[in-house]
């Protein structure tokens, strides 16, 4: 916090059957409000793991298959290149070269469909990983269409309650608005994310450290949820592609454990987000394993987050901050804490 001038942080640790949350600094500078157990942070791309979980749950229910094409559920894209992309490709960032961000000219769903109808792949499907809000955003759109409901409704009224998460939101209720932390950048006024096309599906969730610990616990040992949701959670840990130093699961990113800090830095480097990377398909896909380090970063203009867990150790960590500080610092802190704890488990 001192090095990067971070106003506030919440750190959650789950170890065995114990959970701990540590709060530091302020959620708001003016008026001054300290970080507490109810403070809500923007999750950024950690939100993508919930979209993936919902899609996996839809597959368990029989609403869709990851081998389906986009056009099978979005008729407006029938006969287009994007319409022929599979849902698995969307959930692994391998549709063939999709931009990171939704173009500025796309202001609504109609604009999005017109943009996607004219999209042309840069690479053959499932040969390159191009990290994209559009890919996972469209996975959310397709999943909602297959389940015949709005995406936000499925997340807030079905998935989150089923997971036992009661302090996580896309649409923040007014009576919880006071818990929403301000985000900060150096030398500028407080900032919060701007909602836009596909924001709910790609980066739009708010949550507390304690609620995210619940999510990590269910990802490691899913016992408090229904059997179909248990299957869905574990299915998101299936390894589909090798991408540089890491294995691309269904949105989650995975490393064989024990893992080196250098490998985690490489796998979470900015180049993995901004640059295309060739991938090698794992055939057959790698079944979910316990001896792995699974992680996901999340960033918005004013927030920087990281979650990681080791299933065989039942160790997990949530690091939430109201400043977008370097990812390698987040990874290093998590690695030091979980490595120390792993010696006792």
Image (spheres, rainbow, N blue to C red):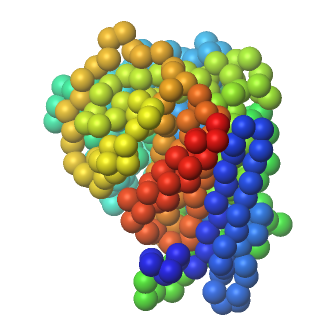
- Residue 151: quadrant of the picture: top right
Is any atom of residue 160 visible in this view? Answer: no
- Residue 157: quadrant of the picture: top right
Is any atom of residue 23 visible in this view? Answer: yes
Task: Using the image, determine if residue 327 lies above or below residue 256.
Answer: below
Residue most extreme to the right: 175
Residue most extreme to the front: 343
For residue 60, side relative to residue 136 (left or right):
right
Closer to the camera, 256 or 75?
A: 256
Task: Using the image, determine if residue 61 lies above or below residue 185.
Answer: above
Task: Using the image, determine if residue 342 lies above or below residue 162.
Answer: below
Residue most extreme to the top: 284
| Residue 299 % position (x, y) | 46, 60
Q: Is the C terminus in the top left, top right, bottom left or bottom right quadrant?
A: top right
| Residue 323 % position (x, y) | 50, 72
Q: Residue at x 30, y 55 (%)?
A: 270
Closer to the camera, 265 or 67?
A: 265
- Residue 38: quadrant of the picture: bottom right
Query: How many marks can you see?
Result: 0
Q: Residue at x 51, y 20 (%)?
A: 288
| Residue 79 % position (x, y) | 30, 22
For residue 1, side relative to residue 176 (left or right):
left
For residue 228, side relative to residue 84 (left or right):
right
Q: Residue at x 71, y 73 (%)?
A: 35
Q: Residue at x 32, y 48 (%)?
A: 262
| Residue 327 % position (x, y) | 40, 59
């Amino acid at each position: 916090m001192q090095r990067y001038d971070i106003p506030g942080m919440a750190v959650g640790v789950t170890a065995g059957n114990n959970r701990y949350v540590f709060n530091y600094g302020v959620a708001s500078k003016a008026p001054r409000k300290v970080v507490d157990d109810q403070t809500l942070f923007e999750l950024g791309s950690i939100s993508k793991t919930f979209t993936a979980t919902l899609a996996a749950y839809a597959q368990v229910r029989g609403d869709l298959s990851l081998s389906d094409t986009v056009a099978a559920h979005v008729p407006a894209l029938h006969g287009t290149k994007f319409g022929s992309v599979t849902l698995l490709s969307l959930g692994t960032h391998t549709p063939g070269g999709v931009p990171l961000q939704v173009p500025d000219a796309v202001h609504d769903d109609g604009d999005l469909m017109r943009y996607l109808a004219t999209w042309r792949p840069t690479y053959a499907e499932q040969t390159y990983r191009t990290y994209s809000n559009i890919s996972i955003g469209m996975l959310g759109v397709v999943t909602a269409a297959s389940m015949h409901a709005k995406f936000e409704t499925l997340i807030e009224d079905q998935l989150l309650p089923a997971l036992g998460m009661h302090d996580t939101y896309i649409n923040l209720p007014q009576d919880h608005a006071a818990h929403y932390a301000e985000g900060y950048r150096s030398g500028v006024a407080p900032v919060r994310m701007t909602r836009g096309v596909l924001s709910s599906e790609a980066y739009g969730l708010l949550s507390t450290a304690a609620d995210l610990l619940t999510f990590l616990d269910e990802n490691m040992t899913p016992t408090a949820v229904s059997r179909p949701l248990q299957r869905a959670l574990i299915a998101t840990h299936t390894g589909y592609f090798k991408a540089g130093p890491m294995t691309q699961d269904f949105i989650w990113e995975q490393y064989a454990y024990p893992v080196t800090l250098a490998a985690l830095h490489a796998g979470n480097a900015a180049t993995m987000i901004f640059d295309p990377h060739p991938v090698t398909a794992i055939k057959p896909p790698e079944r979910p394993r316990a001896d792995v380090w699974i992680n996901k970063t999340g960033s918005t203009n004013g927030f920087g987050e990281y979650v990681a867990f080791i299933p065989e150790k039942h160790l997990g960590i949530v690091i939430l901050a109201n400043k977008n500080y370097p990812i390698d610092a987040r990874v290093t802190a998590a690695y030091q804490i979980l490595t120390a704890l792993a010696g006792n488990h």
